[in-house]
């Protein structure tokens, strides 16, 4: 991409806060291990082996150990979150989405609308089909608003303008043909099995049939594209 650009991503300065929070949790846990093990032994005459092992350590050792483990755990949580959210790079000509696993670029001409739908960034074309639906974070709403409005992209805010058009998918319900139901059925299985790549491929196949899909918890929701 050419020219000045704005990059939106998770603030790396938050990493120490996550580590600190994890350290506090670890410290508190070190003080609760003993009472927890005693309670379990009294109630069910057993306790998990890791808890019993930690309980056998002197408090002067278990406190710094669990504090350090908690800090490391907090840093890991931040890293996972940062990798999932990735980066949004905006300039005058295009929008680039980058994550640990993939990257994609969309030109200004093909973008009709951009918005946050809960914690997903959605880019829509002029047919109201979704060019992209990627993991983001609602906490980035202000930064995203500034980036897109600065370059006069069609930013639609923090709610899907067609939110009411989505319907919970019910297998074999009217409104969808058998092929669409079959694809949604396969996508449900892929999501259950943790096959995210296959689920995304099935989303693309549904989009080609004029069916836009999003996930709400364990449910799939869909809306139909207007007929040309």
Image (cartoon, rainbow, N blue to C red):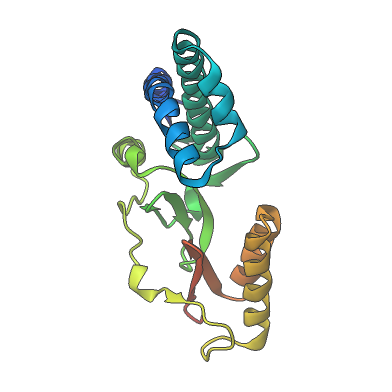
Q: 38 left or right of 148?
A: right
Question: Which of the pair 49/169 is nearer the observer?
Answer: 49
Q: At 37% from the left edge and 24% from the top edge, which residue is drawn?
A: 28
Work out whether 70 lies above or below 182.
above
Which image quadrant for residue 18?
top left
The answer to whether residue 24 shows anywhere in this view is: yes
Q: Return the x and y of residue 51 as percentages of the image width and height.
A: 54, 30
Q: 10 left or right of 200?
A: left
Q: Return the x and y of residue 223 as percentages of the image width and height.
A: 47, 75
Question: Which of the pair 95/171 is nearer the observer?
Answer: 171
Work out whether 91 lies above or below 181.
above
Q: At 44% from the left edge and 26% from the top edge, which residue is drawn?
A: 34
Q: Quadrant of the N terminus?
A: top right
Q: Return the x and y of residue 133 as percentages of the image width and height.
A: 51, 54
The answer to whether residue 93 shows anywhere in this view is: no
Q: At 40% from the left edge and 20% from the top edge, which residue is drawn?
A: 27
Which image quadrant for residue 56?
top right
Which image quadrant for residue 166?
bottom left
Q: 163 left or right of 86?
A: left
Work out whether 113 lies above or below 223.
above
Question: Which of the pair 88/77 is nearer the observer?
Answer: 77
Which residue lies most toward the top here? 60
Q: At 36% from the left edge and 41% from the top edge, which residue is drawn?
A: 148
Question: Which of the pair 214/217 is nearer the observer?
Answer: 217
């Amino acid at each position: 991409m050419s020219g000045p650009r704005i990059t939106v991503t998770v603030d790396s300065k938050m990493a120490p806060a996550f580590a600190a929070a994890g350290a506090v949790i670890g410290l508190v846990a070190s003080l609760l291990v003993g009472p927890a093990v005693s309670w379990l032994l009294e109630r069910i005459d057993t306790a998990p082996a890791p808890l019993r092992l930690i309980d056998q350590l002197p408090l002067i050792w278990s406190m710094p150990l669990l504090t350090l483990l908690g800090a490391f755990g907090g840093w890991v949580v931040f890293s996972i979150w940062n990798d999932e959210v990735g980066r949004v790079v905006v300039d005058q000509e295009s929008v680039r989405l980058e994550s640990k696993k993939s990257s994609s670029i969309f030109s200004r001409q093909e973008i009709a609308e951009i918005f946050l739908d809960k914690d997903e960034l959605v880019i829509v074309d002029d047919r109201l089909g979704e060019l992209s639906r990627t993991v983001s974070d609602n906490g980035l709403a202000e930064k995203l608003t500034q980036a897109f409005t600065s370059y006069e992209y069609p930013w639609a805010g923090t709610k899907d303008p067609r939110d009411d058009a989505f319907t919970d998918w019910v297998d074999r319900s009217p409104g969808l043909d058998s092929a669409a139901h079959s694809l949604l059925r396969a996508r449900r299985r892929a999501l259950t099995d943790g096959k995210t790549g296959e689920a995304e491929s099935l989303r693309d196949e549904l989009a080609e049939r004029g069916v836009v899909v999003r996930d709400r918890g364990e449910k799939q929701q869909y809306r139909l594209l207007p007929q040309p």
